[in-house]
Structure formats: C-alpha cells, structure tokens
Amino acid sequence: MRVGYPESVPGRCLAALAIVLGACTAAVVCRQPHPRTAEAAPPAGAEPDTLTRRHAELHVRYAEARLTAAIVDLEKALDLVRVKPGQVAESELRGLRGRVEVLREHVEATRRQPHGNSFDFALAVARKAADQAERDLARARSANSLRPDAVSGGTIKQLEARSDVARTRLAIWEDPAFLQSPLHVMQMQIDQLSDQVHDLVQRLDRAPAIDLR
C-alpha cells in the first residue's frame, strides 16, 4: 500500500525543529528543573548505589532500544529494495547502515559508562557523517572519470559543500578548545540536528509517497 505524504509534513518537521531548538536553549540558559522531576523521583530513602544501578540500567536499555529501532529501519529498507530495486536510494541505505554501526558502538560505550557519554556519541555521529560525505563525493568523481557528466556539475558542488560542512564540524568536535562549555556543546548538537532535519525535509519533498506495507 502506498500513501501520499501530507503537504504539511515538511512544515511540521521544521516546526518540530523550532520547538526542539527553543526547548534546548531554554534548558541550558535558564537551568530550571523540569516540572516532572518530583514525579519521576525514586522513593525516598533509596540507597545511592541502588539508584545509580537503576539509572545505569535505564541508559543501557534506552541505547539498546535505539539500536533495535535502527536495525528494524534498515531491514525494512532492504525488504523494499528486494521487492522493488531502486525504491530506496543507495545513499539512504548507506546512511541507515552507518546509523546502525554508530548505535552499536554507543551501546557498548553505554554499557561501560552509562552516564555522560553523549559527547562521545555526538563525536561518533560526526565522524560517520564526514566519512559518508567523503565517500559520496569520491563516488561521484569516480563516476565522472569513467563517463563525463555522469554526475552533474551542480550535484558535484553540492557534494563538495556537504563534505566541507561535515569535515569542519568533525574538526570542531575533535578539538576540545572549541567546546569549552555545555552551551557550546549544545549549540553544536543543535546545528547537527538542524542539518539532519533539513535533509529529511529534502527527502520528503523528493519522494511524494511512502510504502506502508
């Protein structure tokens, strides 16, 4: 069954991004406790070691759930390709495989260090994005070397620009001097999220239907 995307999907994605950005900024600047903190608090008198273990287990479960979701997404895409080759772009498949790889590493890191490893995860995502951008550009240039104009000049420029963004972002993540405060780290994470949402909106614009089998 194939169902068209509603015309408002890109707008909803951008609206969701605006909400996320606003929430993240407010959380960092105001540093106010979440109103449900008291509701989520564990029972009074709980042992610190018990709380630490409980929180660690939840972090691991969350990381494992994200990995499972990524694996399911990849398997779904591969099923679609088997049914109708070309229905999912190769670049999307590489992105899905890359996400699974990053989340596998994140699960292992979370098992070793349940708390405070979000920076390492963001760094891994930046490295994977830079690697994929370089590979996409190299493939396009290689195609042109075999057959001139196999990839348009506009697409080459687009891939070069994306590669530059990815490599520069990675340079920032790998140099702690650029990230001297939680606010700076948050800003980089927001920028990364913004690019990902933009890419999603572009894919929705180019693909008017979704397979919901």
Image: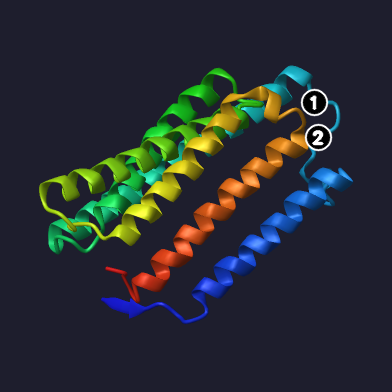
Compared with residue 195, is residue 16 higher up or lower down, i.e. above or below?
below
Check the picture and name the quadrant holding the C terminus.
bottom left
Residue 151, quarter of the rendered image: bottom left
Whole-percent x, y for residue 160 in the image: 39, 47
Q: Report the coloring of the rendering.
A: rainbow
User: Which of 120/163 is in front?
Assistant: 163
Compared with residue 185, is residue 1 higher up or lower down, i.e. above or below?
below
Whole-percent x, y for residue 99 in the image: 40, 41
Marks 1/2: CA–CA distance: 6 Å
1 and 2 marks in contact (CB < 8 Å): yes
The dot on residue 43 is 2
Kindly identify the residue that appears in the image at 51 percent across and 23 percent down.
109
User: Which of 54/122 is in front?
Assistant: 122
The dot on residue 46 is 1
Kind of element beneath mark 1 = loop
Kindly identify the residue that appears in the image at 81 percent across and 52 percent down.
26
User: Which of 34/138 is in front?
Assistant: 138
Compared with residue 190, is residue 11 higher up or lower down, i.e. above or below?
below
Kind of element beneath mark 2 = loop
Kind of residue sitting beneath label 1: Ala
Check the picture and name the quadrant holding the N terminus.
bottom left
